Amino acid sequence: MHFEALLPLQKQTTLNFFLDCWDCDFTFVRQELEFVSFVRDPKPADVHILSSSQRTGSGGEKFFLNFIGLNTFQGQDYEYQYMADQSETRDEVRQGLLKIIKTGVLQYYSQTGFFERVKIHLEDTREMTATEIVEDPWKKWVFSIEAGGNLQQEESQDELSLGTELRIQKVTKDWKTRIEGDYNLDHENYYDDGEIEYQVVHDQLYLPAGNASLEDVLLRRRKMATGYELRLQVGFEFTFGSIYNNVVNERFQN
């Protein structure tokens, strides 16, 4: 992570930091963070940076850096940790601690007008993308299942509608794969004196054995009165698969 001031620091945006870190190379920190104002005493500080460390079982050292907010930042405290292996050189350790300090001071600068003058650059030291770093057992495949139903019931008729849909999708830099399938069922019953007079299934009219003509049924369908009406609608959506959304395919934006 690298950041630097693009314009000179103005007094009204100055934050004062007190670095209380025996393990830090204070000269190195000041050289790398020239725009950060460090003070010699904690009293005028806006943020107190306090460090501690402990040895690990493997022979390394674990550092704790606590950023304690003061004055207008009272109550805004943050803790960061850095693990140094036994094989790390002194320069590697101070670089690791510097990165923690950079991360911490940004928490406070982001709340001032000076943040607009800070340039931030983030990158993985191994030049890997998020897709390459994470382990995705679903290999970017995402599955979604939707289902729902609608029931309308009256004294002289009832209607049932059911619908299901399955979507399967995978997005990479080169391809966008999307598979969809759905099934819908519509069923209507029309009654006369409690008995089914005719049915409509998938827009197809079915007449039970009887004397009713098609014309009679269609005309009656428009005139049927009802004494009550009931409506019920339910549905759900379930998505599973890859939790990651790191890939942008510029050729497929929809």
Image (cartoon, rainbow, N blue to C red):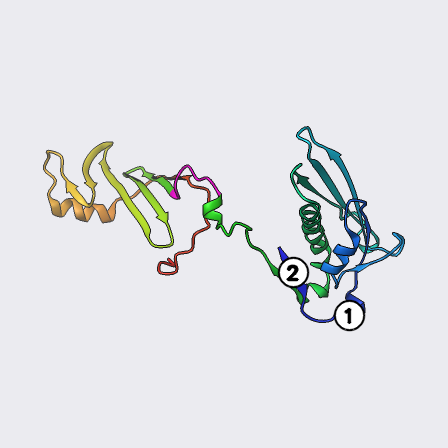
Q: Residue at x 39, y 60 (%)?
A: 250
Say whether residue 73 is left or right of residue 228.
right
Q: Which mark is residue 10?
A: 1
Q: Nearer the viewer, residue 185 or 127?
A: 127
Q: Label 1 is placed on what type of residue?
A: Gln
Say whether residue 106 is left or right of residue 177.
right
Q: Residue at x 22, y 46 (%)?
A: 221
Most common SS among magenta residues:
loop
Q: Position of residue 17 (x, y in %)?
A: 80, 55
Q: Position of residue 156 (x, y in %)?
A: 27, 38
Say whether residue 156 is left or right of residue 87.
left
Q: Which residue is mark 2?
A: 3
Q: Label 2 is placed on what type of residue?
A: Phe
Task: State which quarter of the image contains the C terminus.
Answer: bottom left
Q: What span is colored magenta in the figure?
A: 134-141
Q: Position of residue 212 (x, y in %)?
A: 12, 40
Taking the magenta stretch, the answer to whether it contains residue 156 is no
Mark 2 crowd level (few <14, some 14–19, many ≥20, 10 Å Cα): some
Q: Nearer the viewer, residue 47 or 194?
A: 47
SS for callout 1 = loop
Camera sees residue 132: yes
Residue located farthest toward the top when viewing the structure as drawn? 57
The nearer-to-camera label among 2 and 1 is 2
